[in-house]
Amino acid sequence: MEKSANAEIQEVIINVKSEREANSPSGNESQNEEVDGEANASIGNGHQNRELVKDITQMLESSEPPLSPKCCIYRVPLDLRNLNEEAYTPKVISIGPFHHGVERLEAMEKRKVRYFKIFVEKAKLNVENLVSIIRDREKDVRSCYSEISNLSTDDYVKMILLDASFIIVFLLKRGHEEWADCDNSTTFTERLMIAIFNDIWLLENQLPLFLIEELYSLAFPSPSNYPLFTQLAIQLCEELVTDFFSPLNEHHLSSYSNFHFLDLARTISLSQSKRLQKRSIGNKFLRTYNASQLVDAGVKFKVVSSECLFDIEFTNGVLKIPCLTLYIQTESLFRNLVALEQCHYQFDRYVTDYVYILDFLIDTNKDVDLLVEKGILVNTLGDSNAATTLVNKLSQHTYFIVMNSDYCRLCENLNTFYSVPCHKWKAILRRDYFSTPWRIASTVAAIILLVLTFIQTVRSFY
Protein backbone atom coordinates (compact mmCIF):
# COMPACT_ATOMS: atom_id res chain seq x y z
CA MET A 1 0.00 0.00 0.00
CA GLU A 2 2.67 2.42 1.06
CA LYS A 3 4.76 1.71 -1.99
CA SER A 4 1.87 2.21 -4.44
CA ALA A 5 0.88 5.50 -2.81
CA ASN A 6 4.40 6.81 -3.17
CA ALA A 7 4.47 5.70 -6.77
CA GLU A 8 1.25 7.60 -7.49
CA ILE A 9 2.62 10.76 -5.87
CA GLN A 10 5.81 10.53 -7.93
CA GLU A 11 3.74 10.08 -11.11
CA VAL A 12 1.66 13.19 -10.35
CA ILE A 13 4.81 15.25 -9.75
CA ILE A 14 6.33 14.07 -13.03
CA ASN A 15 3.12 14.93 -14.96
CA VAL A 16 2.93 18.42 -13.44
CA LYS A 17 6.55 19.07 -14.21
CA SER A 18 6.08 17.84 -17.79
CA GLU A 19 3.08 20.12 -18.33
CA ARG A 20 5.01 23.10 -16.95
CA GLU A 21 7.93 22.41 -19.26
CA ALA A 22 5.59 21.96 -22.23
CA ASN A 23 3.72 25.21 -21.57
CA SER A 24 6.78 27.27 -20.72
CA PRO A 25 8.90 29.08 -23.33
CA SER A 26 12.57 28.33 -23.68
CA GLY A 27 13.54 31.39 -21.57
CA ASN A 28 11.53 30.06 -18.65
CA GLU A 29 13.24 26.71 -19.04
CA SER A 30 16.63 28.32 -18.55
CA GLN A 31 15.33 30.27 -15.56
CA ASN A 32 14.04 27.09 -13.98
CA GLU A 33 17.37 25.43 -14.59
CA GLU A 34 19.14 28.35 -12.96
CA VAL A 35 16.84 28.18 -9.95
CA ASP A 36 17.41 24.46 -9.62
CA GLY A 37 21.18 25.02 -9.92
CA GLU A 38 21.16 27.71 -7.27
CA ALA A 39 19.15 25.51 -4.96
CA ASN A 40 21.56 22.62 -5.41
CA ALA A 41 24.55 24.97 -4.90
CA SER A 42 22.93 26.37 -1.78
CA ILE A 43 22.44 22.87 -0.42
CA GLY A 44 26.09 22.03 -1.22
CA ASN A 45 27.40 25.24 0.36
CA GLY A 46 25.29 24.63 3.41
CA HIS A 47 26.83 21.19 3.83
CA GLN A 48 30.33 22.60 3.36
CA ASN A 49 29.64 25.39 5.86
CA ARG A 50 28.46 22.90 8.44
CA GLU A 51 31.67 20.90 8.02
CA LEU A 52 33.79 24.07 8.26
CA VAL A 53 31.92 25.28 11.34
CA LYS A 54 32.42 21.86 12.90
CA ASP A 55 36.18 21.98 12.18
CA ILE A 56 36.52 25.52 13.58
CA THR A 57 34.55 24.55 16.69
CA GLN A 58 36.82 21.58 17.28
CA MET A 59 39.86 23.82 16.72
CA LEU A 60 38.62 26.31 19.32
CA GLU A 61 37.88 23.56 21.82
CA SER A 62 41.37 22.06 21.42
CA SER A 63 43.23 25.41 21.53
CA GLU A 64 45.58 26.09 24.43
CA PRO A 65 44.28 28.41 27.16
CA PRO A 66 45.93 31.84 27.59
CA LEU A 67 49.09 32.03 29.68
CA SER A 68 48.48 32.14 33.41
CA PRO A 69 49.46 35.33 35.27
CA LYS A 70 51.79 33.04 37.24
CA CYS A 71 53.70 32.03 34.10
CA CYS A 72 57.41 32.74 34.52
CA ILE A 73 59.23 29.86 32.75
CA TYR A 74 59.22 30.08 28.96
CA ARG A 75 60.40 28.40 25.83
CA VAL A 76 63.08 30.58 24.28
CA PRO A 77 61.70 32.33 21.16
CA LEU A 78 62.78 30.58 17.98
CA ASP A 79 64.60 33.57 16.46
CA LEU A 80 66.79 33.83 19.57
CA ARG A 81 67.34 30.08 19.79
CA ASN A 82 68.51 29.89 16.17
CA LEU A 83 71.39 32.27 16.93
CA ASN A 84 72.98 29.77 19.33
CA GLU A 85 70.90 26.76 20.29
CA GLU A 86 73.53 25.38 22.66
CA ALA A 87 73.30 28.47 24.84
CA TYR A 88 69.74 27.55 25.85
CA THR A 89 70.00 23.75 25.94
CA PRO A 90 70.97 21.73 29.06
CA LYS A 91 74.14 19.67 28.69
CA VAL A 92 73.81 17.09 31.48
CA ILE A 93 70.54 17.45 33.42
CA SER A 94 66.92 18.32 32.72
CA ILE A 95 64.96 20.31 35.31
CA GLY A 96 61.23 20.66 34.76
CA PRO A 97 59.09 19.43 31.85
CA PHE A 98 60.61 21.17 28.81
CA HIS A 99 63.58 18.80 28.39
CA HIS A 100 62.21 15.88 30.38
CA GLY A 101 62.74 12.53 28.67
CA VAL A 102 65.52 13.69 26.32
CA GLU A 103 67.63 10.61 25.70
CA ARG A 104 71.07 12.21 26.09
CA LEU A 105 70.07 13.49 29.56
CA GLU A 106 68.83 10.13 30.83
CA ALA A 107 72.12 9.35 32.61
CA MET A 108 71.31 11.91 35.31
CA GLU A 109 67.88 10.39 36.01
CA LYS A 110 69.50 7.55 37.99
CA ARG A 111 71.44 10.08 40.04
CA LYS A 112 68.21 11.97 40.71
CA VAL A 113 66.73 8.79 42.19
CA ARG A 114 69.83 8.32 44.36
CA TYR A 115 69.63 11.92 45.53
CA PHE A 116 65.94 11.53 46.30
CA LYS A 117 66.74 8.50 48.45
CA ILE A 118 69.46 10.45 50.27
CA PHE A 119 67.08 13.37 50.80
CA VAL A 120 64.30 11.17 52.22
CA GLU A 121 66.60 9.18 54.51
CA LYS A 122 68.66 12.06 55.91
CA ALA A 123 65.61 14.30 56.41
CA LYS A 124 63.50 11.36 57.71
CA LEU A 125 60.61 12.16 55.39
CA ASN A 126 57.52 10.18 54.46
CA VAL A 127 57.28 9.66 50.69
CA GLU A 128 53.49 9.69 50.81
CA ASN A 129 53.51 13.15 52.41
CA LEU A 130 55.88 14.44 49.74
CA VAL A 131 53.69 13.08 46.95
CA SER A 132 50.58 14.63 48.55
CA ILE A 133 52.24 18.05 48.78
CA ILE A 134 53.29 18.09 45.14
CA ARG A 135 49.97 16.66 43.94
CA ASP A 136 48.17 19.47 45.77
CA ARG A 137 50.46 22.02 44.12
CA GLU A 138 50.46 20.44 40.66
CA LYS A 139 48.08 22.99 39.15
CA ASP A 140 50.14 25.91 40.51
CA VAL A 141 53.36 24.39 39.18
CA ARG A 142 51.91 23.72 35.72
CA SER A 143 50.67 27.32 35.52
CA CYS A 144 54.28 28.55 35.82
CA TYR A 145 55.20 27.12 32.40
CA SER A 146 54.38 28.64 29.03
CA GLU A 147 53.59 25.25 27.47
CA ILE A 148 51.18 22.54 28.58
CA SER A 149 52.93 19.29 29.44
CA ASN A 150 51.48 16.04 28.10
CA LEU A 151 52.66 14.11 31.16
CA SER A 152 49.99 12.45 33.27
CA THR A 153 49.47 13.66 36.84
CA ASP A 154 51.43 10.73 38.29
CA ASP A 155 54.37 11.18 35.91
CA TYR A 156 54.34 14.95 36.43
CA VAL A 157 54.37 14.64 40.23
CA LYS A 158 57.18 12.10 40.06
CA MET A 159 59.25 14.33 37.78
CA ILE A 160 58.81 17.42 39.97
CA LEU A 161 59.59 15.44 43.14
CA LEU A 162 62.86 14.04 41.75
CA ASP A 163 63.96 17.39 40.29
CA ALA A 164 63.17 19.39 43.43
CA SER A 165 64.90 16.94 45.76
CA PHE A 166 67.96 16.86 43.47
CA ILE A 167 68.25 20.66 43.65
CA ILE A 168 67.91 20.62 47.44
CA VAL A 169 70.68 18.03 47.82
CA PHE A 170 72.82 19.89 45.29
CA LEU A 171 72.45 23.10 47.32
CA LEU A 172 73.23 21.34 50.60
CA LYS A 173 76.31 19.65 49.13
CA ARG A 174 77.65 23.12 48.34
CA GLY A 175 76.48 24.91 51.48
CA HIS A 176 76.41 22.44 54.41
CA GLU A 177 79.30 20.37 55.72
CA GLU A 178 77.21 17.35 56.74
CA TRP A 179 76.03 16.93 53.14
CA ALA A 180 79.32 17.56 51.37
CA ASP A 181 80.16 13.84 51.09
CA CYS A 182 76.63 12.47 50.85
CA ASP A 183 77.36 11.16 47.35
CA ASN A 184 80.75 9.45 47.28
CA SER A 185 80.36 8.27 43.71
CA THR A 186 83.59 8.58 41.75
CA THR A 187 81.57 9.76 38.75
CA PHE A 188 80.54 12.96 40.53
CA THR A 189 83.56 14.98 39.49
CA GLU A 190 84.24 18.68 39.66
CA ARG A 191 83.63 18.80 35.91
CA LEU A 192 80.13 17.40 36.40
CA MET A 193 79.43 19.84 39.26
CA ILE A 194 80.32 22.76 36.97
CA ALA A 195 78.15 21.37 34.17
CA ILE A 196 75.16 21.04 36.54
CA PHE A 197 75.85 24.54 37.88
CA ASN A 198 75.69 25.93 34.32
CA ASP A 199 72.48 24.03 33.48
CA ILE A 200 70.68 25.43 36.53
CA TRP A 201 70.64 28.94 35.00
CA LEU A 202 68.96 28.05 31.70
CA LEU A 203 65.53 29.62 31.22
CA GLU A 204 63.97 26.39 29.95
CA ASN A 205 65.50 24.40 32.83
CA GLN A 206 63.79 25.96 35.84
CA LEU A 207 61.54 24.92 38.72
CA PRO A 208 59.40 27.40 40.66
CA LEU A 209 61.27 28.38 43.82
CA PHE A 210 58.13 28.33 45.96
CA LEU A 211 57.81 24.56 45.49
CA ILE A 212 61.46 23.79 46.29
CA GLU A 213 61.25 26.03 49.35
CA GLU A 214 58.09 24.25 50.52
CA LEU A 215 59.78 20.83 50.35
CA TYR A 216 62.90 22.20 52.05
CA SER A 217 60.86 23.72 54.87
CA LEU A 218 59.08 20.42 55.37
CA ALA A 219 62.42 18.59 55.61
CA PHE A 220 64.19 21.16 57.78
CA PRO A 221 61.63 23.26 59.66
CA SER A 222 62.94 26.41 61.31
CA PRO A 223 64.61 26.68 63.74
CA SER A 224 67.16 23.99 62.95
CA ASN A 225 70.85 23.50 62.35
CA TYR A 226 70.25 23.96 58.65
CA PRO A 227 70.31 27.35 56.91
CA LEU A 228 67.09 28.71 55.46
CA PHE A 229 66.40 27.83 51.86
CA THR A 230 66.44 31.57 51.12
CA GLN A 231 70.06 31.75 52.25
CA LEU A 232 71.13 28.75 50.16
CA ALA A 233 69.36 30.05 47.04
CA ILE A 234 70.81 33.55 47.37
CA GLN A 235 74.28 32.13 48.11
CA LEU A 236 74.16 30.11 44.88
CA CYS A 237 73.01 33.10 42.83
CA GLU A 238 75.55 35.42 44.43
CA GLU A 239 78.26 32.99 43.42
CA LEU A 240 77.10 33.24 39.82
CA VAL A 241 76.88 37.04 39.91
CA THR A 242 80.35 37.33 41.47
CA ASP A 243 81.90 34.98 38.91
CA PHE A 244 80.45 36.68 35.85
CA PHE A 245 79.80 40.25 36.92
CA SER A 246 81.33 42.22 39.78
CA PRO A 247 82.10 41.51 43.45
CA LEU A 248 79.00 42.01 45.60
CA ASN A 249 78.85 45.05 47.84
CA GLU A 250 77.01 45.61 51.09
CA HIS A 251 73.64 45.86 49.38
CA HIS A 252 73.22 42.12 48.80
CA LEU A 253 69.77 40.59 49.34
CA SER A 254 68.63 39.04 52.59
CA SER A 255 65.31 37.88 51.15
CA TYR A 256 63.66 37.53 47.76
CA SER A 257 60.32 37.13 46.04
CA ASN A 258 61.43 35.76 42.70
CA PHE A 259 60.16 33.03 40.43
CA HIS A 260 63.20 30.81 39.84
CA PHE A 261 66.99 30.75 40.01
CA LEU A 262 67.59 32.69 36.78
CA ASP A 263 65.18 35.42 37.86
CA LEU A 264 66.80 35.55 41.30
CA ALA A 265 70.27 35.91 39.74
CA ARG A 266 68.96 38.81 37.65
CA THR A 267 67.48 40.48 40.74
CA ILE A 268 70.75 40.15 42.67
CA SER A 269 72.79 41.62 39.81
CA LEU A 270 70.39 44.58 39.56
CA SER A 271 70.26 45.06 43.33
CA GLN A 272 73.91 46.14 43.29
CA SER A 273 73.02 49.24 41.29
CA LYS A 274 72.37 52.58 42.94
CA ARG A 275 71.35 54.25 39.72
CA LEU A 276 68.80 52.13 37.83
CA GLN A 277 66.18 54.47 36.44
CA LYS A 278 62.48 53.79 36.10
CA ARG A 279 61.30 53.34 32.56
CA SER A 280 59.42 56.10 30.78
CA ILE A 281 57.44 55.77 27.55
CA GLY A 282 59.02 58.99 26.32
CA ASN A 283 62.55 57.60 26.40
CA LYS A 284 64.01 57.50 22.92
CA PHE A 285 66.45 54.93 21.60
CA LEU A 286 69.90 56.37 20.90
CA ARG A 287 73.04 54.87 19.44
CA THR A 288 76.54 56.03 20.21
CA TYR A 289 80.00 55.57 18.70
CA ASN A 290 82.33 52.62 19.19
CA ALA A 291 85.20 52.70 21.64
CA SER A 292 87.88 53.53 19.06
CA GLN A 293 85.89 56.46 17.69
CA LEU A 294 85.21 57.79 21.17
CA VAL A 295 88.92 57.61 22.07
CA ASP A 296 89.76 59.48 18.86
CA ALA A 297 87.25 62.13 19.93
CA GLY A 298 88.99 62.56 23.29
CA VAL A 299 86.90 60.31 25.54
CA LYS A 300 88.91 58.62 28.28
CA PHE A 301 87.97 55.11 29.43
CA LYS A 302 88.32 54.13 33.08
CA VAL A 303 87.52 50.82 34.78
CA VAL A 304 85.45 51.03 37.97
CA SER A 305 85.72 48.27 40.56
CA SER A 306 83.26 46.89 43.13
CA GLU A 307 80.16 48.39 41.54
CA CYS A 308 77.19 47.02 39.65
CA LEU A 309 78.02 45.87 36.15
CA PHE A 310 75.24 48.02 34.73
CA ASP A 311 76.37 51.30 36.34
CA ILE A 312 78.08 53.02 33.42
CA GLU A 313 78.78 56.72 33.86
CA PHE A 314 80.18 59.53 31.68
CA THR A 315 81.42 62.66 33.42
CA ASN A 316 83.99 65.30 32.44
CA GLY A 317 85.07 63.39 29.38
CA VAL A 318 85.67 60.13 31.28
CA LEU A 319 83.58 57.01 30.56
CA LYS A 320 83.56 54.83 33.70
CA ILE A 321 82.67 51.16 33.15
CA PRO A 322 82.82 48.23 35.61
CA CYS A 323 84.93 45.25 34.60
CA LEU A 324 83.30 42.42 32.64
CA THR A 325 85.00 39.02 32.32
CA LEU A 326 84.21 37.08 29.15
CA TYR A 327 84.15 33.32 29.78
CA ILE A 328 82.86 30.58 27.52
CA GLN A 329 79.71 30.47 29.70
CA THR A 330 79.19 34.26 29.57
CA GLU A 331 77.25 34.07 26.32
CA SER A 332 74.85 31.44 27.67
CA LEU A 333 74.15 33.42 30.84
CA PHE A 334 73.55 36.71 29.03
CA ARG A 335 71.41 35.04 26.38
CA ASN A 336 69.15 33.42 28.98
CA LEU A 337 68.84 36.65 30.98
CA VAL A 338 67.93 38.53 27.82
CA ALA A 339 65.45 35.81 26.79
CA LEU A 340 63.80 36.05 30.24
CA GLU A 341 63.43 39.80 29.84
CA GLN A 342 62.11 39.46 26.30
CA CYS A 343 59.46 36.95 27.41
CA HIS A 344 58.46 38.24 30.85
CA TYR A 345 59.51 41.84 31.47
CA GLN A 346 57.78 44.31 29.22
CA PHE A 347 59.55 47.43 30.47
CA ASP A 348 62.34 46.57 32.93
CA ARG A 349 64.79 45.14 30.40
CA TYR A 350 67.96 46.35 32.04
CA VAL A 351 70.17 43.46 30.91
CA THR A 352 68.98 44.01 27.34
CA ASP A 353 69.92 47.70 27.64
CA TYR A 354 73.40 46.78 28.86
CA VAL A 355 73.87 44.36 25.97
CA TYR A 356 73.01 47.16 23.53
CA ILE A 357 75.54 49.51 25.15
CA LEU A 358 78.21 46.81 24.81
CA ASP A 359 77.27 46.34 21.17
CA PHE A 360 77.58 50.08 20.55
CA LEU A 361 81.06 50.21 22.07
CA ILE A 362 82.39 47.09 20.35
CA ASP A 363 82.32 46.93 16.56
CA THR A 364 85.76 45.56 15.70
CA ASN A 365 88.67 43.71 17.27
CA LYS A 366 90.36 47.09 17.77
CA ASP A 367 87.56 48.07 20.16
CA VAL A 368 88.02 44.86 22.15
CA ASP A 369 91.78 45.38 22.37
CA LEU A 370 91.24 48.93 23.59
CA LEU A 371 88.81 47.88 26.34
CA VAL A 372 91.11 45.03 27.38
CA GLU A 373 94.02 47.47 27.58
CA LYS A 374 91.94 49.73 29.85
CA GLY A 375 91.01 46.77 32.10
CA ILE A 376 87.31 47.08 31.29
CA LEU A 377 87.23 43.69 29.55
CA VAL A 378 88.95 40.52 30.68
CA ASN A 379 88.93 38.26 27.64
CA THR A 380 89.45 34.56 28.38
CA LEU A 381 88.03 33.44 25.01
CA GLY A 382 91.41 33.27 23.30
CA ASP A 383 91.31 36.09 20.77
CA SER A 384 89.68 39.44 20.12
CA ASN A 385 87.61 38.15 17.22
CA ALA A 386 85.78 35.68 19.48
CA ALA A 387 84.92 38.46 21.92
CA THR A 388 83.75 40.77 19.13
CA THR A 389 81.51 38.07 17.66
CA LEU A 390 80.04 37.20 21.07
CA VAL A 391 79.12 40.80 21.91
CA ASN A 392 77.79 41.67 18.46
CA LYS A 393 75.40 38.70 18.40
CA LEU A 394 73.96 39.16 21.89
CA SER A 395 71.60 41.95 20.86
CA GLN A 396 70.33 40.35 17.64
CA HIS A 397 66.55 39.71 17.49
CA THR A 398 65.98 41.55 20.77
CA TYR A 399 63.31 44.21 21.13
CA PHE A 400 62.22 46.68 23.78
CA ILE A 401 59.64 49.42 24.02
CA VAL A 402 61.67 51.94 26.01
CA MET A 403 65.32 52.26 27.03
CA ASN A 404 66.82 52.96 30.43
CA SER A 405 66.69 56.75 30.76
CA ASP A 406 70.15 56.72 32.34
CA TYR A 407 71.56 55.02 29.24
CA CYS A 408 69.67 57.45 26.99
CA ARG A 409 71.41 60.37 28.69
CA LEU A 410 74.73 58.48 28.51
CA CYS A 411 74.47 58.06 24.74
CA GLU A 412 73.28 61.64 24.29
CA ASN A 413 76.18 63.05 26.31
CA LEU A 414 78.73 60.90 24.45
CA ASN A 415 77.33 62.02 21.09
CA THR A 416 77.42 65.67 22.18
CA PHE A 417 81.02 65.34 23.34
CA TYR A 418 81.98 63.62 20.09
CA SER A 419 80.50 66.44 17.98
CA VAL A 420 82.71 69.16 19.54
CA PRO A 421 85.74 69.65 17.20
CA CYS A 422 88.18 70.91 19.85
CA HIS A 423 87.88 67.59 21.73
CA LYS A 424 89.14 65.76 18.64
CA TRP A 425 92.00 68.23 18.17
CA LYS A 426 93.09 67.79 21.78
CA ALA A 427 92.92 64.02 21.36
CA ILE A 428 95.06 64.15 18.23
CA LEU A 429 97.66 66.32 19.94
CA ARG A 430 97.69 64.08 22.97
CA ARG A 431 97.94 60.90 20.90
CA ASP A 432 100.41 62.00 18.20
CA TYR A 433 102.65 64.45 20.08
CA PHE A 434 102.35 63.92 23.84
CA SER A 435 101.67 60.20 24.33
CA THR A 436 105.23 59.26 25.44
CA PRO A 437 108.19 61.12 27.02
CA TRP A 438 110.17 60.85 23.78
CA ARG A 439 107.34 62.34 21.76
CA ILE A 440 106.94 65.13 24.29
CA ALA A 441 110.67 65.90 24.12
CA SER A 442 110.74 65.85 20.33
CA THR A 443 107.59 67.99 20.15
CA VAL A 444 108.99 70.59 22.56
CA ALA A 445 112.28 70.63 20.63
CA ALA A 446 110.41 71.12 17.36
CA ILE A 447 108.38 73.97 18.84
CA ILE A 448 111.53 75.67 20.18
CA LEU A 449 113.24 75.25 16.83
CA LEU A 450 110.20 76.65 15.07
CA VAL A 451 110.09 79.69 17.38
CA LEU A 452 113.83 80.38 16.96
CA THR A 453 113.51 80.07 13.20
CA PHE A 454 110.59 82.52 13.24
CA ILE A 455 112.58 85.00 15.36
CA GLN A 456 115.58 84.67 13.06
CA THR A 457 113.40 85.29 10.04
CA VAL A 458 111.86 88.39 11.58
CA ARG A 459 115.27 89.80 12.50
CA SER A 460 116.60 89.13 9.04
CA PHE A 461 113.59 90.97 7.56
CA TYR A 462 114.19 94.05 9.66
Image: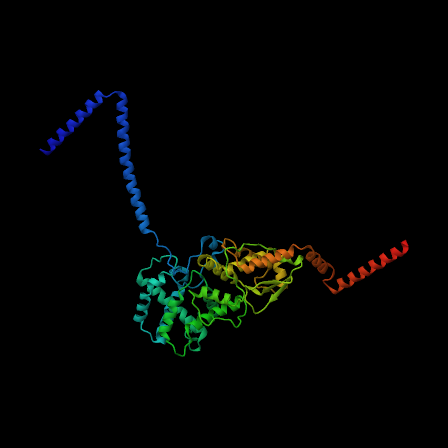
Image point (79%, 62%), residue name: 444
Residue at the spot x=71%, y=60% of the render?
430
> Toward the viewer: 6 or 410?
410
Model colouring:
rainbow
Q: Is residue 386 visible?
A: no
118 to 152, vertically: above or below: below
Q: Left or right of 441: which side holds 111? A: left
The answer to which of 308 and 157 lies nearer the viewer is: 308
Residue 320's place in the image compared with 29, above or below, is: below
Q: Residue at x 54, y 68 (%)?
A: 246
State the image coordinates of residue 210 (x, y, percent, origin top left). Answer: 39, 67
- In screen coordinates, is 261 left or right of 449? left
Question: In the image, is residue 329 above or below residue 50?
Answer: below
Quadrant for residue 418, please give it: bottom right
Residue furthest to the left: 1
| Position of the N terminus by quadrant | top left
> What x and y, as percent, mark residue 104?
41, 60
Q: Position of residue 39 (x, y in %)?
A: 26, 32
> Residue 300: x, y in percent?
65, 62
How many numbered badges does the structure rendering display?
0
| Image quadrant occupied by the C terminus | bottom right
Q: Is residue 189 left or right of residue 375?
A: left
Which one is nearer the viewer's eye here, 276 or 131?
276
Decide if residue 439 is in sight here: yes
